[in-house]
Image: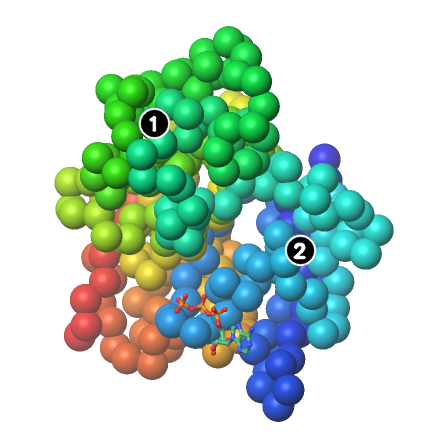
Amino acid sequence: MPTAIELHNVSWRRGEQTILQGIDWVVEQGQHWAVLGLNGSGKTSILNMINGYMWPTSGEISVLGRRFGTVDLRELRKSIGWVSSSLQEKIRPNEQALDIVISGRHASIGLYAEIESEDRCKAQRLMEDLGCAHLLGRAYQTCSQGEKQKLLIARALMASPKLLILDEASNGLDFISREALLQSIDRLAARSDAPTLLLVTHHTEEISAVFSHSLLIRRGEIFARGRSEDVLTEEKLSEFFEMPVAVERQGGRAWLSVR
Ligand SMILES: Nc1ncnc2c1ncn2[C@@H]1O[C@H](COP(=O)(O)OP(=O)(O)OP(=O)(O)O)[C@@H](O)[C@H]1O
C-alpha cells in the first residue's frame, strides 16, 4: 500500500526567510495524524505543499504514492479533501445545504454537472453520518457555524478522498458544537473506508484517541512526531511551547493548562 504522505528534507525559503526547514514526515495510509503548532509555525505552508499549491525550495514530496514532479496535480487533488475556513467564504450564502454537499462530488463550488440520483443518495447518507441531515433544504447562510463545518466535511467526503485535511475545523464553535463535531470526526475515522485524516489544530484536547499520531511544528521545523501518547506529554509540550504546562488526560485526550 503506498504511503499517504512523504516529505523528505523539505525546505521552503522566501528571499531571506526560511519558512520550512528540513521537514521529514511520513504518514502511512490508514493512520490519522494531528498537526499542532503555534501561529506562523508553518502548518499551512506544509498543507499547501501537500496539495501542490506551493513548491518546496528543496526536498521531495509524494502524496498517495505519487511523487511530485511526475504527477498531474489536478488529478491528485481529486483524492484530497481540504476543509478550511477559507472554503467557507467561497460558498454562496443562499445555496442549499444538500446542493453544497453534492457539489463536492466534482470538487467544484456550485453545481455544474447534472445531479445524479446516486449523488443525491450519497450526499444524504453523508449528512446523516455527520448528524446534519435535518439541514437538507436549508440555505447555507441560515446554518450555524458548527452546522456549516459539518456540511463542508460532508461535501469533502462526496469525492471519496483518500486523504482528508481538517484545518482548524472547530474554529468559532461553542463547547457543545465542538464536541458534536469531534464526535462526528471520531465516527468518520472509525469507518472501515475512512480516508487518512490530518487534523490541524491549536488545541491538544481536540486530539482524540483516533488520532494515533501527532506532529509538532515549531518555527518551520519539526519539533516532535510519533505516537500521540508519546508526543503529547507534559515534558514535550512544555519544551514545545517554551512554557511549563500541565497535561491532564481524560477520555484519551490531553487537556492543557499553564503551570
Ligand atoms: N507567501 C508567503 N510569503 C512570505 N511569507 C510567507 C508566505 N506564506 C507564509 N509565510 C510566512 O511563513 C510563516 C508560516 O506561515 P504559515 O501560514 O504556514 O503558518 P501556520 O502555522 O499555518 O500559522 P497559523 O496557525 O497562524 O495559521 C509565517 O511567518 C508566514 O508569515
* Res 145 → quadrant: top left
Horizontal and vertical percent position of residue 16: 62, 90
Image mark for residue 169:
none
Q: Is residue 104 visible?
A: yes
Q: Mark 2: which amino acid?
A: Gly
Image mark for residue 96:
1
Q: How many marks?
A: 2
Q: Residues within 10 Å of mark 1 (few under 14, many from 20)?
A: some
- Residue positioned 78% across, 51% down in the render: 67
Q: Mark 1: which amino acid?
A: Gln
Query: Where 36 falls versus 153 (above or below)?
Result: below
- Residue positioned 46% across, 73% down in the render: 41
Q: Left or right: 112 with respect to 186? A: right
Q: Is residue 183 visible?
A: no
Horizontal and vertical percent position of residue 11: 66, 74
Q: Quadrant of the N terminus?
A: top right
Q: Nearer the viewer, residue 234 or 243?
A: 243
Outermost residue, bottom side: 16
Query: Where 186 falls versus 229 (above or below)?
Result: above
In terms of secondary structure, where does tag 2 sit?
A: loop
Q: Nearer the viewer, residue 194 or 242?
A: 194
Separation (CA) of disc 2 from disc 1? 30 Å
Q: Nearer the viewer, residue 144 or 209?
A: 144
Q: Quadrant of the C terminus?
A: bottom left
Query: Where 172 falls versus 12 (above or below)?
Result: above
Q: Residues within 10 Å of mark 2 (few under 14, many from 20)?
A: some
